[in-house]
Amino acid sequence: MLDAVPKVAGLLDFHGRAVVVTGASGGIGAGIARRFAEAGAGVAIGYRGDRAGAEALAAEIGAAAIAVHADVTDDAAVEGLMQATVDRFGRIDALINNAALQDHAAFAELPGAAFDRMLQANVGGAFRCAQAAARRMGEGGAIVNIASISGLEPAFGHAHYCASKAALIMLTRAAALELGPRKLRVNAVAPGLIWRDGLDENWPEGLARWLAHAPLGRVGQDEDVADACLFLASPAARFITGATLTVDGGVTAHPSY
């Protein structure tokens, strides 16, 4: 028997639902939290180091948001984040795994400890959060992992970051396979270059190369990633799981030779 098809008007309505966003004290994570709040969701803002940023964002959103300290590599902290969400909102409907590390090092000089730390945060953290959130989700729950086009194509100085995001994409597919029978969906978003303050000053040559290469002729904005998450977490994506949605202005559409 086929499920009833939701009306278009309510597809992106998150009123009465609760969303956890990790790494949400600034940047892309903050943009995602704002967008879900705008759609009516209660939002748990997970953060590790920037308490002031997380609390300022929660104050900006208002009563529909809480800021919760959580190092995603720590089991107890992750459980605390998920339980705080349930305590405040009574449920978890979506998890956006955004918390991540990113730094640069040439492959030959990359310390093993730095490689391990990157995998532990970017893959292990997403795994811990997904597992803890899934235990508290009912049917229709959604998990969205923030990957990267670096998980699809290599880049100089990014061996450990590329490896972590490629692993996250496969973790997404594996989790979708196993959680599907519980009617939980797991997808990923792979952003390209997203604007941040100082990008034009700190990396002018890279920005110029991107703009020359991107079919849409611009860098992304936090909201571009946030809207992809909103879609994948919503009933509009009810038959989509195990997928990776590339949000890069068409950069990876170029031929590789």
Image: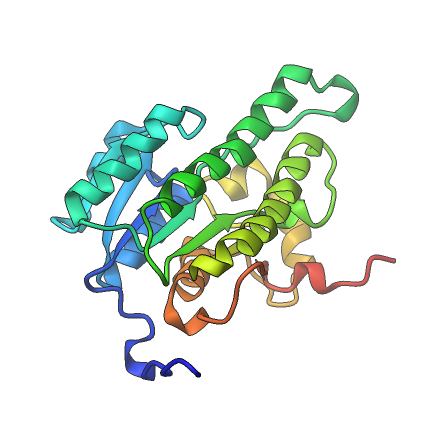
Image side of residue 161 versus residue 140, left or right: right
**Residue at x 16% of width, y 51% of height:** 64
Q: Percent position (x, y) of residue 181? A: 48, 60
Relative image position of residue 247 (x, y in whole percent): 56, 60
What residue is drawn where x is 35% and y is 54%?
94
Look at 54% across and 52% down and name the residue there: 178
Horizontal side of 4 relative to 84 (left or right) equals: right
Q: Is residue 72 above or below residue 19?
A: above
User: Is there any visible trace of residue 57 in the rendered image?
Assistant: no
Residue 27: percent from the left, percent from the top? 40, 43
Q: Quadrant of the C terminus?
A: bottom right
Q: Is residue 16 left or right of residue 93?
A: left
Residue, far right:
257
Depth order, front residue of 200/47: 47
The colour mode here is rainbow
Residue 7 position by quadrant: bottom left
Q: Is residue 116 above or below residue 96?
A: above
In this view, the residue farthest toward the front is 1
Residue 126 position within the rendered picture, expressed as x and y whole percent measured from the top left? 48, 39
Q: Measuring 62% from the left and 22% from the top, which residue is drawn there?
A: 116
Picture quadrant where residue 16 is located: bottom left
**Does residue 254 lie above or below 193 as drawn?**
below
Quarter of the image for the N terminus: give it.
bottom left
The single residue placed furthest to the left in the displayed view is 63
